Image (cartoon, grey):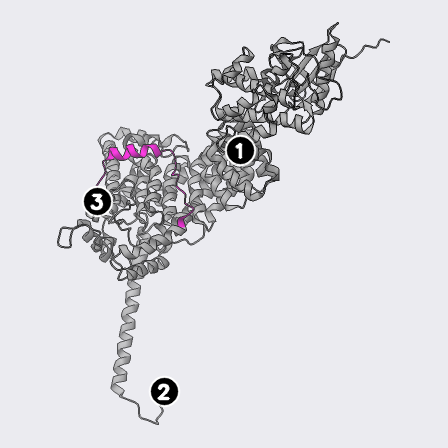
Amino acid sequence: MWFFARDPVRDFPFELSPDSPEGGPPGPWVLHRGRKKATGSPVSIFVYDVKPGADEQTQVAKAAFKRLKTLRHPNILAYIDGLETDKCLHVVTEAVTPLKMYLKERAEAGGLKELELSWGLHQIVKALSFLVNDCSLIHNNVCMAAVFVDRAGEWKLGGLDYMYSSQGNGGGPPRKGVPELEQYDPPELADGSGRAVREKWSADMWRLGCLIWEVFNGPLPRAAALRNPGKIPKSLVPHYCELVGASPKVRPNPARFLQNCRAPGGFMNNRFVETNLFLEEIQIKEPAEKQKFFQELSKSLDSFPEDFCRHKVLPQLLTAFEFGSAGAVVLTPLFKVGKFLNAEEYQQKIIPVVVKMFSSTDRAMRIRLLQQMEQFIQYLDEPTVNMQIFPHVVHGFLDTNPAIREQTVKSMLLLAPKLNEANLNVELMKHFARLQAKDEQGPIRCNTTVCLGKIGSYLSASTRHRVLTSAFSRATKDPFAPSRVAGVLGFAATHNLYSMNDCAHKILPVLCGLTVDPEKSVRDQAFKAIRSFLSKLESVSEDPTQLAEVEKDVHAASSPGMGGGAASWAGWAVTGVSSLTSKLIRAHPAAAPAETNVPQRPTPEGLPAPAPTPVPATPASPGHWETQEEGTDTAEDSSAADRWDDEDWGSLEQEAESVLAQQEDWSPGGQASRAGQTSNLATKSPESDGSSWEAEGSWEQGWQEPSPPEPPPEGTRLASEYNWGGPEPGDKGDPFAALSARREAGAQLRRDSWGDDNWEGLETESRQGKAELARKKREERRREMEAKRAEKKAAKGPMKLGTRKLD
């Protein structure tokens, strides 16, 4: 039987990459890129081939192998594994690049910033301080070739071949025998004058000065060039001069050199160095310190190197969330760093954390996730959205905090394309119906309508037919004026989803009722929509063969591109739907808590009006509001057409109190007017109209029967009755103010006219008419009975004292 000797190189768990070697420090070592066979993770492999007659070099290489294996420090090249045979030495370290090659690559890409250079030099000086002060070792080889850079941009000190003890045990410094390295020796060793080195760190600090000169000026041609600082920053020059002083006694200890450079105004006193130092000690920091650090980190990430953010900041953020108590503050910097990752890395590192965050009960974390969803939604697949994210997100619809409900509604614009049939057409519509009908916050009802208009093309054909018309009709009767505008824009943005019969019999009657709305912004949008629908009906009337083409999307399956046709004739509505809430929030940050059952009044001087188009801040009466040109409106809103507003709704409730307080000075009635508004708010809610919910969460009943709102309580003043700084009472006012008054006074007559009645609810109106007639008959009967009792009592006269009336 034959036995073959095993090849240790073949059995080594690491292998060299097939490409050419990367070089290495001057001497016998050659640096190769490599990888671990089991995982494929990248490593660097230093290879030394044993040659006959080179025993001295072999001993130096073996000593370096031993030193690197035993020394552990964050700023010294990290040893992973090694192999020693009679023919070669293999030293496996973390994946690194020689500093010389790294600087060349970065120079071609635009060069290194001073921030990066300051931190790199800080790391090398800190490594020297560790060797000299803690280990009593002299590196004896500090130069450009002994410094390496890892993938995060961290500088590592290597080249430990010629290291020796400063305490004298183990002999003196080994002979280098490499001319390229001897030029970095200090003058007291090179000139042979016999001057003794007074401090153990003097030689290494001289070599550090040579390294600093090469980092900023390129390869060192000769020692005399050190006299000219060249491109070395002015804040570093005084400390550099101490390093290359002729007298060894002037050269500072590495620890003192760091202290000098970290002084106020020093080269290493900057935000980048401070961030790195905090990250190195983050495990021992107090929770309050971590919170403050992560809050301020986002502002600095834009100026930090990309590799540093990906490979150093990101792991710390993930660790802080996984094992620490950082909470929601890590979200902003986490998503900011996530922009530097490719799709595969994002799926592996960010998405698992995001999915876990959605299950959190922390409101601050939930609202920040919703606000920043557009940054990671493209990396979420449909099963993850429907099974792990959407079930947690829908809880926000029922939250008592208005900010949570608001952001949850907005997030549906991003989630809708990834939702399945049940979640989109059943679960989501149930919540939307409840919010639009019962939520007490006007902006939330408005945004619900806006969102429905944007996602209408994703709904199934049956859901669109059952929901859209009724939902937008309900919105046009909302007491909150921007909600009525949103209803009109919703009709226009989804125009291609309605049949011609629906346009003529359901939509146009609703829109015509808005042509006499007290708010001019509502009237303007209503006229635009009416003209658009009429032109569509007229074109089909002129050429009936176009009917099939016009109604091709009505019964089609849901598709994200179905709403694209709106841009051809109703582009103003598509852009207006997405930008409405942005302007609404800026104009009325707390309009909902102060709303009443009367239409919104114009805003006083200095505040913009709550309209889908910007309105001048100068005071004006309702009839004199300026109308913006359609083209201007579209141009302004185009930048916001595909995004939601970036405003923070966290202060919705607090701002409401301040707005209510300010209304004392705005309204003529002062305190009484404000009291009346508060009373109306308490008694009037969106569900107070004829379409209140019979079963909670039932969107079928919720959307079906939109009815006109009740007239305001007796004594309530209309918006047109106030003098908002416009013309005097004797001047000509808003012609629509009288229409508004007649509209309120003649509510009963309107039932037989083309107002804003719902044409689907004729049977309901008939029942309401019968009920009203029965109520009047009962009232008349009650009056008759009371009159008869009064007559009987008067006829009998007063009862006699002491007698008892017997029945």
Image spot of residue 779 (x, y percent): 29, 69
Does the image show residue 365?
A: yes
Question: Please, what is the three-letter code of the amino acid marked with disc 1?
Answer: Thr
Question: Is disc 3 in contact with disc 2, using a CB cutoff of under 8 Å?
Answer: no
Query: Quick check: is 371 in the magenta stretch?
Result: no
Looking at the image, which is closer to me, 238 or 778? 238
Residue situated furthest right in the rendering: 1
Residue situated furthest bottom in the rendering: 802
Quadrant holding the C terminus: bottom left
Image spot of residue 339 (x, y percent): 48, 29
What segment is highlighted magenta in the picture? Answer: 626-652
Q: Residue at x 51, y 34 (%)?
A: 334
Return the mark for residue 597.
none
Q: Secondary structure at mark 2?
A: loop
Looking at the image, which is closer to me, 654 or 181? 181
Question: Please, what is the three-letter code of the amino acid marked with disc 3?
Answer: Trp
Distance between mark 3 and mark 2 Cα atoms? 72 Å
User: Is 765 left, or right, of 301 in this rendering?
Assistant: left
Distance between mark 1 and mark 2 Cα atoms? 98 Å
Question: Please, what is the three-letter code of the amino acid marked with disc 2?
Answer: Asp
User: Which badge, 1 or 3, is on the more N-terminal residue?
Assistant: 1
Residue 368 in the image: above or below residue 121: below
